[in-house]
Amino acid sequence: MKRGAIFDMDGTLFDTEKLYRSAWIETADDFGLKRKPEMAPAMSGSSVSTILKKIPQFFPEVDANEYFLRVVKRVKKAIEEKLEIKSGVIEILNYFHENKIPMAIASSSATEEIIKNVKRAGIDKFFDAIIGGDQVANGKPAPDIFQLAAKKINLPPEDCYVFEDSANGIRGAAAAKCVSIMVIDQTPPLPDIRELCAAVFNDMNEALDAIKKSNI
């Protein structure tokens, strides 16, 4: 078993990626534009700076910052109504905690939002470090956020599991030389992403079972 664990947040710890996907599509209504379903997967796991560059590719006629802020507002409202922890998350956090494995969060979301969410869910006690996209110069798929997370828990990246649900997250984790584990949320990995993964699981329960058996 590796000596550290780093978790993405949306779609990995919390069942929120579906909220973002809906928001990316539905926000087009605010501007009287035709919805573009292909926009949602394109934004998954991206940093804010990357997102602001991508929005004009879909809707060049709108202000990218305004579109983004409306998406965030939609998701925040939904999270305040109900924040769902994904299946197996509590179990794997407890397992790592019992085995004295330090844990960190590395999410493209703002650090303040990550802290609010983990406190709301009552899982903040598990994490030794919380790294948001606002703490690094280059967001996912760059390796920066995972390298910083590993540094914060005093371990080399190659001795840390990274649990991710997005292609960009896996790319970043692999670039950081972490042990990249995809836990499928909305989209199964394409062959090029699967090749970067040490393992791919349908949920966190499967991942925990494999770790207990020393299969990864």
Image (spheres, rainbow, N blue to C red):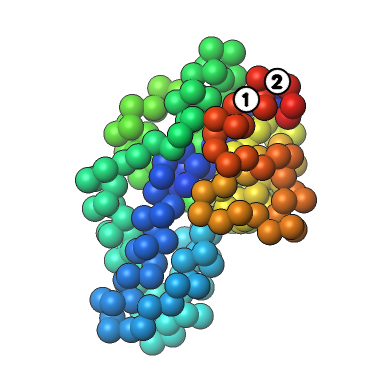
Residue 35 seen = yes
Query: Which amino acid type corresponds to the residue marked 1 in the rendered image?
Result: Asp
The structure residue drawn at horizontal position 32% and vertical position 70%, both measured from the top left corner, is 26
Q: Residue 28 occupies which quadrant of the picture?
A: bottom left
Residue picked out by circle 1: 209
Query: Which amino acid type corresponds to the residue marked 2 in the rendered image?
Result: Lys
The structure residue drawn at horizontal position 49% and vertical position 30%, both measured from the top left corner, is 88
As measured in the structure, the alpha-carbon distance from the residue carrying label 2 to the one carrying label 1 is 6 Å
Q: Does 190 sit above or below residue 110? A: below
Query: As drawn, is 61 to the left or to the right of 80?
Result: right
Structural crowding at the residue carrying mark 2, measured as other residues with C-alpha within 10 Å and reported as few (<14), some (14–19) or many (≥20): few
Residue 187 % position (x, y): 56, 56
Residue 56 seen = no
Structural crowding at the residue carrying mark 1, measured as other residues with C-alpha within 10 Å and reported as few (<14), some (14–19) or many (≥20): few
Residue 188 % position (x, y): 61, 54
The structure residue drawn at horizontal position 40% and vertical position 22%, both measured from the top left corner, is 125
Instruction: Name the one closer to the observer, 167 or 57.
Output: 167
Residue picked out by circle 2: 213
The structure residue drawn at horizontal position 27% and vertical position 59%, both measured from the top left corner, is 73
Q: Residue 200 occupies which quadrant of the picture?
A: top right
Residue 34 % position (x, y): 36, 83
Image quarter where the N terminus lies is: top right
Whether label 2 touches label 1, CB < 8 Å: yes
Query: As drawn, is 144 to the left or to the right of 19?
Result: right
- Secondary structure beneath dot 1 equals helix
Instruction: Name the one closer to the observer, 189 or 56.
Output: 189
Q: Does 124 sit above or below residue 79? A: above
